[in-house]
Amino acid sequence: MISKIEENEFGFTNTWSKMTKLECGLFFANPNLPNDVFFDKLTNISCLSEKMIDEALVLFEKNKTQPFVYVLDDHKLEELLHKKNFRLYDTHHIMKTSISSEMEHSPVHHITKKDTLLWTEVFCKSYDCLDWTEEVNSIVRNSISGTEYLVDSDYKTSCVALYEKNSILGLYCLGTVPTYRKKGLAKSLINYALNQVLNKNLDFLMLETYARDNLLKFYSNLGFEQIYEKKVYTI
């Protein structure tokens, strides 16, 4: 299951960042989205290689972005990272849920190539990255054929990206403009995603969240359970 979930994540990440295969890991970076813990990273590490870590550091520097290295249950790799002056930055929680009957229908607005800027503006306001507007809009426009981008219909101030792979629906980039939070808008988008899982007969809906975001309880209350976690290291 974990490998299928990871492949879903890598598939989506690769639509936003350039992927480079290293000795025994995957390197993602987008210099136009600098210092992003999700889109700029070394992950899927399957061996203990100081040479690869050094190669990744060169690539991070070349892309002018902060280095983030993801570790999935590998204490020796963590020891190597400590040796190279990495520190624990965050914990990445992977969660999933499924349903047996339809959730309450919530109206959503489906983004098309004609209004990608709408989704982009909601995303950038939600994540406080307005300087990314041009790049994000270009990414959304170019990836819309393989990713479903949505905003809520009521206020158009909450956004989400849905990516399907391995019979798993991945929920990414969920965000709400600060002044419109706690109105149930994100929940309405999650309900839509859950109904998609049911209607398409997919295995489950998965999402990822960071400990720093303090949203584990929120997602747990919506029926999500944690499957596994990854440690995120940086310098």
Image (cartoon, helix red, strand yellow):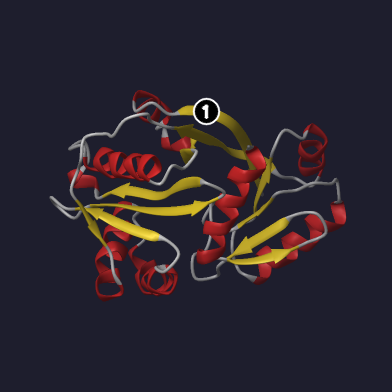
Give amino acid for label 1. Gln
Q: Residue at x 86, y 51 (%)?
A: 49
Q: Is residue 130 left or right of residue 207?
A: left
Q: Position of residue 112 (x, y in %)?
A: 29, 69
Quadrant into which the N terminus falls: top right
The residue lying toward the viewer, choosing from 182 and 220, is 220
According to the picture, the residue beneath numbered tag 1 turns out to be 226
The residue lying toward the viewer, choosing from 120 and 103, is 103
Instruction: Judge whether 181 appears above or below 21 on screen.
Output: above
Q: Is residue 181 left or right of residue 133?
A: left
Q: Residue at x 34, y 28 (%)?
A: 222
The residue lying toward the viewer, choosing from 175 and 84, is 175
The residue lying toward the viewer, choosing from 166 and 226, is 166
Q: Position of residue 167 (x, y in %)?
A: 52, 46
Q: Residue at x 82, y 57 (%)?
A: 52
Residue at the far left: name it. Answer: 154
Instruction: Judge whether 152 appears above or below 95 on screen.
Output: below
